Image (tube, rainbow, N blue to C red):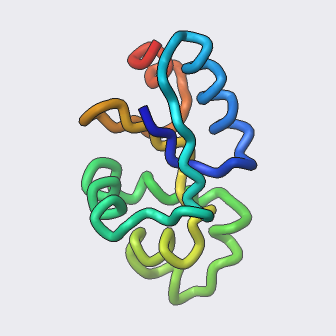
Amino acid sequence: MIIYGLNTCALCQRARKTLEAAGKDVSLRDIRADPLSEAELDALIQEFGDRLVDRTSNDYRGLNEWLKNSEAEAQIAAQPKVMTRPVIRDGDALYLGWDEAVQSALL
């Protein structure tokens, strides 16, 4: 199981600790230190569409107007912190966020 997020993201850390406590083999991939490849990003965009970009974040608000009006791929490539976190890959299944629905599906 892979969590795509940031090492400094509290929600990513909480998800990782909860999954590990449930006996899952989990790795956290920091998307700033190890950016998503174009193919990985395309797969996530296909699965989640525009929900993959957190438009409520300060990082999103800090983007220039051109980037705000561009595709999600360009926004995440330019500023990985705008990606909604965590994105969890469990085999072929992908999950976005750490809400009750995601937790019940994974635990």
Residue sitting nearer the eye, 28 or 76: 28
Q: Position of residue 15 (x, y in %)?
A: 60, 28
- Quarter holding the N terminus is top left
Q: How many discs appear?
A: 0
Answer with left or right where residue 57 lies relative to residue 35.
right
Residue depicted at 61% across the width and 63% down the height? 33
Q: Is residue 49 above or below residue 100?
A: below
Q: Nearer the viewer, residue 13 or 99?
A: 13
- Of 25 and 46, which appears nearest the observer? 25
At 28% across and 65% down in the image, what residue appears? Answer: 39
Whole-percent x and y of residue 20?
Answer: 58, 19
| Above or below for 43 versus 107 | below
Most foreground residue, 41 or 51: 41
Q: Is residue 64 left or right of residue 2?
A: right
**In the drawing, does residue 10 fall left or right of residue 70?**
right
Identify the residue at horizontal 62%, vertical 86% (top origin).
64
Q: Is residue 59 above or below residue 69?
A: above
Q: In the rendered image of this protein, does residue 98 appear above or below residue 63? A: above
- Identify the residue at image location x=51%, y=29%: 26
